[in-house]
Image (cartoon, rainbow, N blue to C red):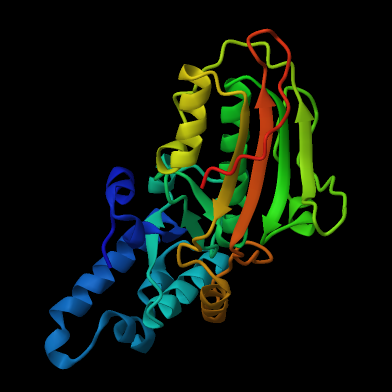
Amino acid sequence: MRTYDGTTVLDLPYQARQLIVVADDALVEASQREEEEALRRQEVGLGWVELVKSATIPFYAALPLGRMAVKAYQAWVQAKASGIPVLQIRRSDAAHITFPIGHPRDGVTYVGHPSVPKVYYPMAEFHKTIFEHKLCEAVRLLMHLGAAKIRVEHESGWSADFCAKLSVPLSAGDEKLAGRASTRSKAQALILYEAHLSGAIAPSCPDDLIWYSHEPTWQAVADGRLNCGLRNFSIKLSYTDDFGVNAGLAAKIQGTGLEVGGKFEDYRSTIWRIAGRFVAKSGTPTKIAAIQLN
């Protein structure tokens, strides 16, 4: 085990820092010393995990730790012994990381955002929150480009039930993606959300987008709107990578005694279609065209 300062943790490759737990500084530092001792004693066959488990009086007994902190540390040791790559970081280093309100907590496993190094979520909420983030960015992009109508339709994967769990503000008002779904004929899509805007703004592309650089269809729509007078759009919102965070991993982590921070929302390969129209130069919205940009 190694201990990193806050900056170095965030500079690690994603795979090396994807899963973290947060512990008291004194515990992490003492644990590091314990690992160094284990490395010095390799000639007698004692590895770090064995050294911790075989100690008559554990090294952390002399530290001013609460019961939950000790339990969380023991669970982390078990996770490491099980081959789960969970990185333990100091609580002071966690000040460099963005967690949800009320976090971090002892014994909870957090998963890093795949595109924003300093952002971490409880494992239970990882997929829901990442999907929310991507959806919100897509809609925000379209709003800044001057969309007059935005319609979100289900194609595959998560649908109305999942939609009801989301809380994503999509307009300046109180409209939210909250499962306002209507089942129509089989030939028609399931409408998850529909918003109407004036579109009477100078179209622009926000400069703080995260997913945009990885989405060529989004780029094509933005270029068409900004430079070519595009009036209709239809893009796919795809979520087709579980990033290695799945029900199997969650079960293994919970089996060690670590927590995932709630009821785990498992990954589902999902495609939603976002269609709509921009305001024409005359100020009159054009009719939606079913153009698929794959």
Residue lying at 28% horizontally and 47% vertically, measured from the top left: 11
Image coords of residue 75 (percent x, y)? 49, 75
Quadrant location of the N terminus in the rendered image: bottom left
- Whether residue 269 is visible: yes
Image coords of residue 204 (percent x, y)? 51, 17
Examine the image and state in which quarter residue 134 appears: top right
Image coords of residue 82 (percent x, y)? 41, 82
Image position of 99 with respect to 32: above or below? above
Examine the image and state in which quarter residue 170 appears: top right
Examine the image and state in which quarter residue 279 appears: top right
- 267 displayed left or right of 284: left
- 25 displayed left or right of 109: left
Instruction: Pick whichever, 240 or 25, lies toward us.
Output: 240
Image coords of residue 131 (percent x, y)? 59, 50
The residue most toward the top is 282
Residue lying at 61% horizontally and 39% vertically, measured from the top left: 291
